[in-house]
Amino acid sequence: MTKPTVLVTGGTGYIGAWIVKELLEKGYHVRMTLRNKARTDKYEFLINLAEESLGTLDLWEADLLHEGSFDEAARGADAVIHVASPFILRIKDARKELLDPALLGTRNVLNAATKSDTVKKVVLTSSVAAVHGDTIDLQKLGLKEFNEEQFNTSSSATHQPYSYSKVIAEKEAWKLAENQDQWKLVVINPSFVMGPPLGGASDSESINFMKDMLKGKFFFGAPDLYFGFVDVRDVAHAHILALENENTSGRHILAERTMSVIDLAAMVKKLYPGKFRLPLGKAPKPLLMLIGGLFGVTSKFVKQNVGYPIKYNTTRSTRDLGLTYRNLEDTVREMVEEI
């Protein structure tokens, strides 16, 4: 039986590369879009993977900001996995660097799916940032945990613009899905993604964050911030499960566990005693309010996120998708070894 053809956007990225790898290993025909095919250094490792896999890999040029540029790549495809969207936290122009690529990109890719007349399923990479903005939101809403029913209402173009980009992009996807009956939308909402990058290099904020920790950036004190954490390979596999399971629908929060940056540092310290300049303790919140700008965060962010625990309900990911999570200790160890 011939395997379906799947269009993947953002296939050279941290999450996307693992998705492409699994699709190729399972024998899918993968169409991967790139902004510039001339940059062979960005995707050569995937070409090599394809040569050793059951599946095939075709490369197409497309740009998130150019209307219609995904139409040709989508024509004849059976499904689309839309991963491409900027994950950058230090920005100069939120609209140009985050909001337009996220919103217009989602619109262009999903419209291409509709025009194709062949695409039957779209799997969208969203984020828990589309579920909530500040971690204080949990307390403000009187919730014990976040689930898929919540949408981020506290972020904006000026406060937490990355989170805002994720919520406006996902809402646009649901709007487009409701206005057609050709394809079904399934959304994956990962928490903070960890684990080894594929291809040896990645400019992901996740990788940069871990490098900063290992190099001692937080040695004299780390912010008391809480995140959900999940392995990048589990995130990739969740997309494949969503693609293959005909009964999946809606949103799916992914998190192996939630813990603080201090807890994460303690985990690294236990795995590698005495090896890295890891945080000595918590940085005082009043101090962070004063010097947050040095780390690219505002006093408002510090006020509404530092010191507030977070919790997610991940039942849908295990019950409906059938996802089994890797142990986070293994994730962290493999990540550190790789970088």
Image (cartoon, rainbow, N blue to C red):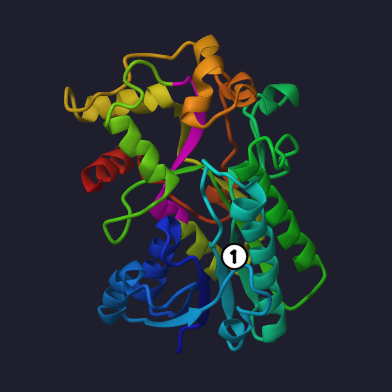
- Residue 194 at x, y percent in the picture: 39, 44
> Is 287 in front, or is 140?
287
Magenta segment boundaries in residue numbering: 223-235
- Residue 62 at x, y percent in the picture: 55, 76
> Is 4 in front, or is 335?
335
Task: Tell me which residue sits at (54%, 54%) in the image.
Answer: 86
Question: In the current view of this chain or complex, which residue is farthest to the right?
Answer: 179
The part of the image, by quadrant, that contains residue 100 is: bottom right
| Above or below 79: residue 173 | above
Task: Tell me which residue sits at (61%, 26%) in the image.
Answer: 301
| 108 relative position to 193: left or right | right
Q: Secondary structure at mark 1?
A: strand
Q: Quadrant of the N terminus?
A: bottom left
Question: In the current view of this chain or complex, which residue is farthest to the front?
Answer: 92
- Residue 326 at x, y percent in the picture: 37, 45
| Above or below 320: residue 121 | below
- Residue 17 at x, y percent in the picture: 39, 64
The part of the image, by quadrant, that contains residue 245 is: bottom right
Q: Is residue 229 magenta?
A: yes
Q: Is residue 82 magenta?
A: no
Residue at the spot of label 1: 123
| 225 relative position to 137: left or right | left
Task: Tell me which residue sits at (55%, 68%) in the image.
Answer: 81
Residue 285 can be seen, yes or no: yes
Dot 1 crowding, Cα within 10 Å, few <14, some 14–19, many 20+: many
Q: How many marks?
A: 1
Residue 194 can be seen, yes or no: no
> Is 114 in front, or is 322?
114
Disc 1 marks a residue whose amino acid type is Val
Task: Tell me which residue sits at (55%, 20%) in the image.
Answer: 306
